[in-house]
Amino acid sequence: MRIVISLGGNALLHRGDRPDAHVQAENIDRVTTAVAGLALDHEIVVTHGNGPQIGLLAEESATDPALSAPYPLDLLGAQTQGMIGSLLVRALYDALPGPRRIASLVTHTLVRADDPAFGRPTKPVGRVYPREVAESLAREHGWHIAEDGGGWRRVVPSPSPERILETETVHQLLDSGALVVCAGGGGVPVTADRATGALTGVEAVVDKDLTAALLAEDLKADFLLVLTDVPCVYAGYGTHDPRPVLDATPEDLRRGGFPAGSMGPKAEAAARFVERTGALAAIGALDAAYEIVHGRSGTLVRRDLTVG
């Protein structure tokens, strides 16, 4: 079975963690345990978030006196793909029986220059701040900020992915027997000139779950596995009466009204993939990846629910 795994941005940096390199290296063990358990029997493509990492690099770049201007988000996204990809590849080589082919590929995601998302920043990146600190940083650097989980974070545009430019290369790597790490942080966002096709990076971070759904569709994957920090989707999440949703159709997920900055894109990604392919998707906790694929955990998403 061909499985595309979308790892949450908190897989390497949990909320409240110091953003140190050794912290991310230590957290990688949970990720590789989850992936390795599936890689023994299935073709695997791993995508990952980069919200904490790209936010850290952006803040460092904005305050670096050696720079005349901060590095743009597209280049910072490429840096995070390389860093996180390297951590994953090294850990997977240690976790999987050899010899194994494992490749990390920096990928680019085509977006529309006129996407309305450029005028409505919603994607949280970087650290969580008290409101006063976030407002001060926003004034200093021209950032947009929004509330996130009791604190405040920088938010950036998140245009919809139109095409992953390296999909055919990923196909070839899979056909050669490789486990592939790609499309990190949703891929480096680029637009294409209508006349020449020339690519230009843009100030945005594409949602990694929506990119994973598009990649899974293009790769003709059998399963899209969206891993996060909750065991399943909850109806009424954030209320006094959250209820676990163990089976859902795309329509069920879209009726859920999930927040745009957290479960919303995950639900939409699963819904799109299932609608367009008829294959299965699931949302659940990182540590339960094997159980989710085998129907023992998480929220399973399919076109029609079988009445038992």
Image (cartoon, rainbow, N blue to C red):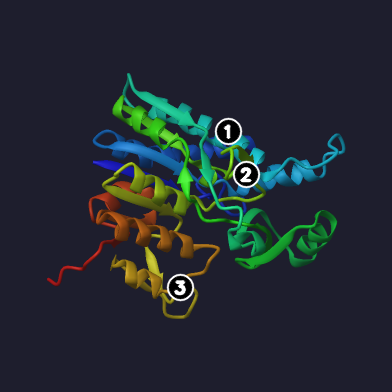
What's the mark number on residue 11? Answer: none
Q: Residue furthest bottom?
A: 240
Earlier sequence position, callout 1 versus callout 3: 1
- The residue beneath circle 2 is 53
In three-dimensional space, the C-alpha distance between marks 3 and 2, rounded to whole angstroms, equals: 27 Å
Tell me the quarter of the image containing the C terminus: bottom left
Kindly report the distance in space between the C-alpha atoms of the residues bearing marks 1 and 3: 33 Å
Q: Which quadrant: the N terminus?
A: top left
Could you say where residue 101 lies in the image, as x and y percent from the top left? 36, 23
Query: Label 3: which residue?
Result: 237
Q: Earlier in the sequence, mark 3 or mark 2?
A: 2
Residue name at image x 46 percent, y 46 percent: 163
Res 83 label: 1
Residue type (three-letter) at the residue carrying disc 1: Met
Q: Position of residue 154 (x, y in %)?
A: 69, 58
Which SS class for mark 2?
Answer: helix
Kindly identify the residue that appears in the image at 45 percent across and 74 percent down: 257
